[in-house]
Amino acid sequence: MRLLLIGPPGSGKGTQAVLIAEHFGIAHISSGDLLRRHVADRTSIGRAIEEYVNRGDLVPDGVVMDLLRKPVTAASQAGGYVLDGFPRTVEQAEAAYLVAKTLGASVRIAVHLDVHRDELVRRVLARGRETGRADDTEEVINHRLQVFDERTRPLLDYYARREQLINVNGARPVEEVTWSVIVQLQRIQRQLNG
Ligand code: AP5
């Protein structure tokens, strides 16, 4: 089981990735969490990318690919993963596809969490007030949403054409969204197993 969660900021990628990974007994890998950990630990990578993350801009592809290569390879060999926040652009998806192919792991399923803008902004600002996450401010969330529309949304067409794409209404209670994803995944697994 190799899943990619795609959705705008606040759509619930992190929340759902934890629950889905737990359900299938596979690894959860979050590019955003890995990057934020480097920033918090003040590593050389963290210092180089902090500005990008705090502004809501995408971190250069090379940095993200280098960080993810090891955990994704290990998880792929151990039975699968839920990747949350990667790929983020068609270029990242193409690079990831080539890596996955060399691992014999090219069939993947992309899950799109669809949530309307007002709810996304509400969730992100509420979390910002609670946790102080640097990019959860009114100004930065607007930019993050714009980056999603320009750089990430084209991925939905890409996955609809090349691999399996599941669309899920993410503007529902957490457990309902999880079950909707799991039911659709089980259906696809049955189809793939013939
Ligand atoms: P990343 O960490 O990926 O953040 P994001 O995409 O902006 O997503 P969020 O973490 O804001 O939201 P989410 O969809 O995970 O929702 P969550 O479950 O947290 O990326 C951050 C930055 O890192 C990027 O801007 C970029 O700089 C860099 N980066 C990361 N990946 C990169 C890549 N591949 N390439 C380049 N740069 C990269 O939920 C949000 C809130 O809503 C929570 O409070 C949660 O409790 C609540 N919530 C969740 N589900 C529900 C629900 N169903 N109902 C009500 N509330 C809910």
Image (cartoon, rainbow, N blue to C red):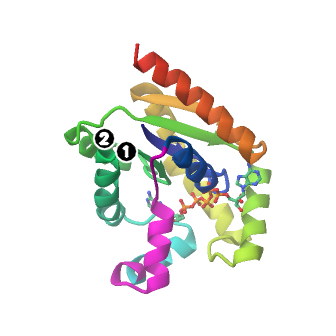
Q: Residue 189's spot in the image, x, y percent? A: 47, 24
Q: How dense is the environment of label 2, judged by Cα within 10 Å: few (below 14), some, or many (20 and up)?
A: some
The residue under the point 37% across, 44% down is 93
Residue labelled 2 has its Cβ within 8 Å of some atom of ligand 1 = no
Q: Secondary structure at mark 1?
A: helix
Picture coordinates of residue 144 (x, y %)?
60, 61
Q: Under 8 Å from ligand 1: the CB of mark 1?
A: no
Position above or below: 37 against 44: above
Say whether residue 61 is left or right of residue 185. left
Residue pushed farthest left? Answer: 102
Residue 20 appears in which quarter of the rendering? top right
Query: For the residue marked with disc 2, what is the amino acid?
Result: Tyr
List the residue tagged with mark 2: 97
State the CA–CA distance, disc 2 to disc 1: 6 Å
Q: Position of residue 60 (x, y in %)?
A: 37, 65
Q: Is residue 68 left or right of residue 53?
A: left
Identify residue for label 1. Answer: 93
Closer-to-camera residue (104/146): 104
Closer-to-camera residue (65/172) = 172
Residue range highlighted in magenta: 25-46
In depth, the one of 117 and 165 nearer the eye is 165
- Check if mark 2's residue and mark 1's residue have beta carbons within 8 Å: yes
Amino acid on which the number 1 mark rests in the picture: Ala
Q: Quadrant of residue 55?
A: bottom right
**Nearer the observer, 104 or 157:** 104
